[in-house]
Image (cartoon, rainbow, N blue to C red):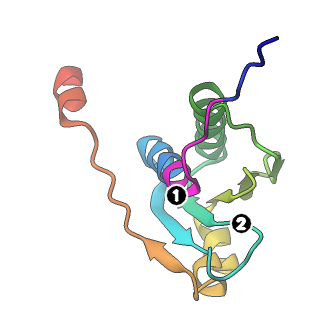
Amino acid sequence: MTTKQKPKLPTSLERAKIAAKIAAENNGRNVVIMDLRGVTPTFDFFVIASGTSRRQMHAISEEIDAAFEKNLGDRRISISGYQESMWIALDYGDIVVHLFEPEKRGYYALEELWGTGKVVPFNYEPNEKQNEETV
């Protein structure tokens, strides 16, 4: 009898960078990855981004979900705020993705609240070849 093994997930840092990249590709603004491994045992990373509309925030959350499930075999544990769309939280266990309206992001100020965490350098550079093909 053979058992099918689940493919090994990328590390939490690699998955946080994937989520951040997807947010940036979908025009999320001010994308930040926060390393909280030394701050809390509950999760490893926050990915925080701002969206400019309900539709955009839904698109970002759906793209992250689809990529994680289809490409990584990783399923979201829970989602909060999707209907209201002022603050959407996607919980993947060791990473939590926060998508905010700019006003709500400033109000909740997660970067300040969790300020003892370290910001992980993240620079999104759109694929130049892709840009040339679409021009």
Q: Considering only vertical position in the picture, is 74 above or below 17?
A: above
Q: Which amino acid lies under the numbered mark 2 shown in the image of this protein?
A: Phe
Q: Which residues are magenta?
A: 7-16
Quadrant containing the N terminus is top right
Q: Which mark is residue 13?
A: 1
Amino acid beneath label 1: Leu
Q: Compared to 130, does 11 lie above or below?
A: below
Residue at image coords 61%, 75%: 36
Residue 17 lies, in percent from the top left, at 47, 53
Looking at the rendering, which quadrant does residue 103 occupy? Answer: bottom right
Q: Residue at x 58, y 88 (%)?
A: 116
Residue to which mark 2 is pinned: 43
Residue 50 location in percent, x, y?
Answer: 55, 59
Furthest residue in direction top, as rendered: 1
Residue 33 horizontal/vertical position (percent): 51, 65
Q: Is residue 9 magenta?
A: yes
Q: Quadrant of the C terminus?
A: top left
- Foreground of the two, 72 or 125: 72
Q: Earlier in the sequence, mark 1 or mark 2?
A: 1
Gap between marks 1 and 2 measured at Cα: 11 Å
Label 1's element?
A: helix
Binning the other alpha carbons within 10 Å of mark 2 as few (below 14), some (14 to 19) or many (20 upward) gives some
Tell me which corner region of the image, top left, top right, bottom left or bottom right, holds residue 42.
Answer: bottom right
Residue at the location (66% across, 46% down)? Answer: 54
Q: Which mark is residue 117?
A: none
Residue at position x 81%, y 53% from top?
81
Q: Using residue 46 as the reference point, say whether residue 5 is left or right of it.
A: right
